[in-house]
Amino acid sequence: MNKLAAVTRSIPALRKLAHPCLLCMHKCEADREKNKKGFCGALQKAAVYSYSPHHGEEPPLSGTRGSGTIFFTHCNMRCVYCQNYTFSRESEFQEIETPYLAEIMLGLQRMGCHNINLVSPTHYAYQIADAMRLAIEGSLDIPIVYNTGGYDSLEVIKLLDGIIDIYLPDMRYSEDLMAAKFSSAPGYVKNNRLLIKEMFRQVGVLKQDKEGIAKKGVIVRLLILPNNVSDTLSTLKFLQEEVSRDIYLSVMSQYYPTYLAGNYPDIARRINEREYKEIIEAVEKLGFTNGWIQGFGTETERFLGTRIKPRL
């Protein structure tokens, strides 16, 4: 089944999940068609903060011409340390019709972007699929990246089979207590792990062209949080034992206490060198070979493109 057929097949089911809204694990059942807001505050039209070529993603996504990033507002998680809070929750935005969203996608392709990068797309899965149908009919043919916090409905991810080329999920926590406290995401861990398994089943290990540009696969983002709030080690063990040690990882040390984080002592500081080294050593000890590790200290706020050492 080609992508246009897959999108066309999934649109009715995604629309049904959106009205009342069951697109994410909050399952708040908001009647968005009747202008009723649920947990995230999203309504019927897709709310977009910005779109542009983005050069700060992982190297195979940004490449030389940038990742065609579309930032959606009304994130379905409420992370108290959100580094993007100015546009994920508290920002000006534009609510747009489906044809306009399709034209944004085509415009980013015309700019030369390597992919279309959908940031916080969960609550607009239906609108995105509908826009993709129009964009594909209008010659969209670059990979689609699904850049999510990992609190989607499993049913939504299953409906995206054959539509999404590259999954870019967070695995933020290994304890539900932490997910609920810091991201208002109860039941995060079990669902998040089921999502990763399904994503990997669909698209597998990351595939790149001869220029090193990502074409298909999964990249898991692991943000190390202080005081073991993220319990990243447990997440790594899960990936090794239940998914694949060949999966691509993006290990991030960039955390800093912003937004409301100062109100929570456990996360009111950056990670320290010991916490950083513990995770980097675990990555190597558990046999992961693919991905990138951010540097520590002065290099913490940008991707270094450090390749995880290959197995011999």
Image (cartoon, grey):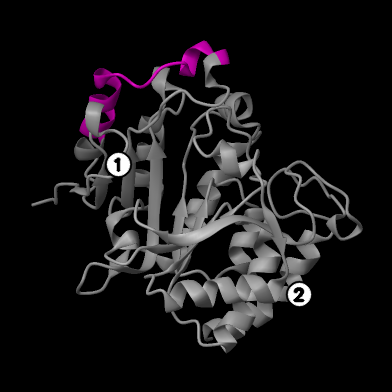
The amino acid at mark 1 is Arg
Counting from the top left corner in percent of width and height, residue 90 is at 65, 38
Side (left or right) of 33 relative to 56: right
Element type at mark 1: loop
- Residue lying furthest front in this view? 92
**Are discs 2 and 1 less than 8 Å apart at CB?**
no
Q: Residue, x 55% and y 70% (percent of image)? A: 161
Residue 266 on the magenta span: yes
The tag earlier along the polypeptide, 2 or 1, is 2
The secondary structure that most of the magenta stretch takes on is helix
Counting from the top left corner in percent of width and height, residue 111 is at 41, 74
Q: In the image shown, does 146 or 154 lie closer to the viewer?
A: 146
Q: Residues within 10 Å of mark 2 (few under 14, many from 20)?
A: some
Element type at mark 2: helix
Counting from the top left corner in percent of width and height, residue 175 is at 53, 28
Q: Residue, x 70% and y 72% (percent of image)? A: 98
Can you identify the residue that label 2 sits on? 12
Side (left or right) of 284 relative to 125: left
Side (left or right) of 190 relative to 272: right
* Residue 102, quarter of picture: bottom right
Looking at the rendering, the stretch of residues picked out in magenta corresponds to: 263-282
- Residue lying furthest right in this view? 34
Residue 192 visible in the picture: yes
Does 5 appear above or below 246? Answer: below
Q: What's the CA distance linking mark 2 and mark 1?
A: 40 Å
The amino acid at mark 2 is Pro
Residue 296 visible in the picture: no
Counting from the top left corner in percent of width and height, residue 290 is at 24, 53
Q: Nearer the viewer, mark 2 or mark 1?
A: 1
Can you identify the residue that label 1 sits on? 302
Please tell me the numbered disc located at residue 142.
none
